[in-house]
Image: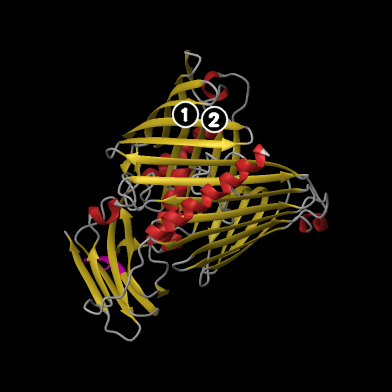
């Protein structure tokens, strides 16, 4: 009997936890005064919410003991504000003055692969690594063409190059939401 | 083994100066300095084991190799003791426009789902990986859908029909703004020992991750299930609650665990947690300090019918 009571208590605890935190989750809503998409360079505060170091935060560069920081990230923040689900197309590149690629743009699966390659811990049974992967799944642009749901959502598009990314370079992102004018972000990395 | 490790390190150094390849060499493990017996001992692989990992990737990330050496510090390599150091897994992988091929002695988690934290629920926390010698062929995601087939080709000659009867089939479907479903069926029609692994990770709500996993070992009459929640919506706080249940020939065992972790500073965090399980209960508090570059120390104090405490140094270092 005691065992049954314990199991019932355990199930109730799990259900209560889910109910409490589900109710805390905010639902982003469409705001007609804002553009469908706006693009900016992500700030430290924008990405800090994913954790205080690269064990859990995929937007902080990996670092090594002897060779130091091997990569440099440049993160673009895409803020969506859509009345309904829509097709999104992205063109993104980072080029040097001579036209050479300065950094590569990463979408969700490639970004997960990047971190798998640069992960010291066992990637599939470590809580921190799992949280970092979930943070990618939750926040990284899924592909260069995808469907974005209604409401206000933020996604991040990482450019990754060797450290440092060769300068000068131009970081360019164009995002087109079906039926609207494309939004363009251009940044001269000096 | 020593020659192999030296070779891997040499290749890593080549990679460090090459523009065509990216290499990573890393070491992961833990040291226990003090435990509840009051003794201090330099246990170089802690209560677990250390791993030396070598990875190399082409410039365009379309092929690479990976190898993991188990128990690198565990006596044999550094101290010449019994030979326990071994290459635990290795693989060569190639990625094309539509497919990815991975071959070697695999340890692949592409179709695995784990609880968000796992460590607190000891009865069941993750579905199976694809492991062992063989060739794993995966499609690259098409609208979020991935299919994988693993042929477990052994190092000993085996009937091809028997290999086919042991095929593993993986399916994964990622739904944008909702979550990811994954399934891995480990066929073993020879023994028989068929296993179905199922998992769903829900990320459709801001700051909340919910995971449901199950494992059905039909021939072994063993059935496992677990659910886990992780909430990161309060600044600097991560809350976890997880529960698992296992039925083996009708006999059940369970485990429920919860933990809250607060980031006091960027380097200092504190956790309190507890578990209640068939095997007993445990309550504990941990204080972790991250020194940077993968070095973390942890002081822990707990009670599970007796007081226990420990000071541990975790290292996860890339070279």
Q: Where does the magenta region start and end?
A: A93-100
Q: Quadrant of the C terminus of chain B?
A: top left
Q: Residue at image x 76%, y 53%?
A: B194
Residue A159 on image: x %, y %: 32, 60
Q: Chain of mark 2?
A: B
Query: Please, which residue is most extreme toward the top here?
Result: B39
> Disc 2 on helix, strand or loop?
loop
Residue B65 seen in the figure: no
Q: Which residue is mark 2?
A: B48
Residue B210 on image: x %, y %: 49, 55
Q: Quadrant of the N terminus of chain B?
A: top right
Q: Residue at image x 49%, y 43%?
A: A126
- Pick the residue in front: A92 or B240: B240
- Pick the residue in front: B44 or B86: B44
Residue B224 on image: x %, y %: 67, 49
Q: Is residue A96 magenta?
A: yes
Q: Residue at image x 32%, y 79%?
A: A176
Residue B288 on image: x %, y %: 36, 32
Question: Residue B168 lies in what quarter of the image?
Answer: bottom right
Is mark 1 in CB contact (under 8 Å) with mark 2? Answer: yes
Q: Which residue is mark 1?
A: B30
Sort mark 2 into few (<14), some (14-19) or many (20+) by Cα contacts within 10 Å: few
């Amino acid at each position: 009997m005691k065992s049954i009571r314990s199991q019932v208590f355990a199930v109730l605890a799990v259900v209560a936890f889910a109910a409490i935190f589900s109710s805390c989750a905010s639902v982003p809503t469409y705001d007609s005064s804002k553009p469908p998409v706006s693009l900016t360079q992500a700030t430290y505060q924008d990405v800090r919410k994913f954790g205080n170091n690269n064990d859990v935060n995929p937007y902080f560069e990996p670092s090594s003991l002897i060779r130091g920081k091997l990569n440099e990230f440049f993160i673009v923040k895409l803020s969506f504000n859509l009345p309904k689900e829509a097709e999104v197309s992205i063109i993104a590149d980072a080029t040097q003055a001579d036209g050479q690629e300065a950094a590569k743009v990463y979408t969700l699966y490639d970004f997960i692969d990047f971190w798998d390659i640069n992960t010291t811990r066992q990637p599939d049974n470590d809580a921190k690594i799992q949280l970092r992967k979930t943070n990618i799944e939750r926040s990284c642009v899924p592909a260069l063409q995808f469907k974005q749901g209604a409401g206000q959502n933020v996604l991040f598009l990482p450019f990754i190059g060797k450290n440092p990314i060769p300068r000068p370079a131009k970081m360019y992102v164009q995002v087109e939401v079906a039926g609207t004018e494309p939004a363009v972000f251009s940044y001269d990395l000096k | 083994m020593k020659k192999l490790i030296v070779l891997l390190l040499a290749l890593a150094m080549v990679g460090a100066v090459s523009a065509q390849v990216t290499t990573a060499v890393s070491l992961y493990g833990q040291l226990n300095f003090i435990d509840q017996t009051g003794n201090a001992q330099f246990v170089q692989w802690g209560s677990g084991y250390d791993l030396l990992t070598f990875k190399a990737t082409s410039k365009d990330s379309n092929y690479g190799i990976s190898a993991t050496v188990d128990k690198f510090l565990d006596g044999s390599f550094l101290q010449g003791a019994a030979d326990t150091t071994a290459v635990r897994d290795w693989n060569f992988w190639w990625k094309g426009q539509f497919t990815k091929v991975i071959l070697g002695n695999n340890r692949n988690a592409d179709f695995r789902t784990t609880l968000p934290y796992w460590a607190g629920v000891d009865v069941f926390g993750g579905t199976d990986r694809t492991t062992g010698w063989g060739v794993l062929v995966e499609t690259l995601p098409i609208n979020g859908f991935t299919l994988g087939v693993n042929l477990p080709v052994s190092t000993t000659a085996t009937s091809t029909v028997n290999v086919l009867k042991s095929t593993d089939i993986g399916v994964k479907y990622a739904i944008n703004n909702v979550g990811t479903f994954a399934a891995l069926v480990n066929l073993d029609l020879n023994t028989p020992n068929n296993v179905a692994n199922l998992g769903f990770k829900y990320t459709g709500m801001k700051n909340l991750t919910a995971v449901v996993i199950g494992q059905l070992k039909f021939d072994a009459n063993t059935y496992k299930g677990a659910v886990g929640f992780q909430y990161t919506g309060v600044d600097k706080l991560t809350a976890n609650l997880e529960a698992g249940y296992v039925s083996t020939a009708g006999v059940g065992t369970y485990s429920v665990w919860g933990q809250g972790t607060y980031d006091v500073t960027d380097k200092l965090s504190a956790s309190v947690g507890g578990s209640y399980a068939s095997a007993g209960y445990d309550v504990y508090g941990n204080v972790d300090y991250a020194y940077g570059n993968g070095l973390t120390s942890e002081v822990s104090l707990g009670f599970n019918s007796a007081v226990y405490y420990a000071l541990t140094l975790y290292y996860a270092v890339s070279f």
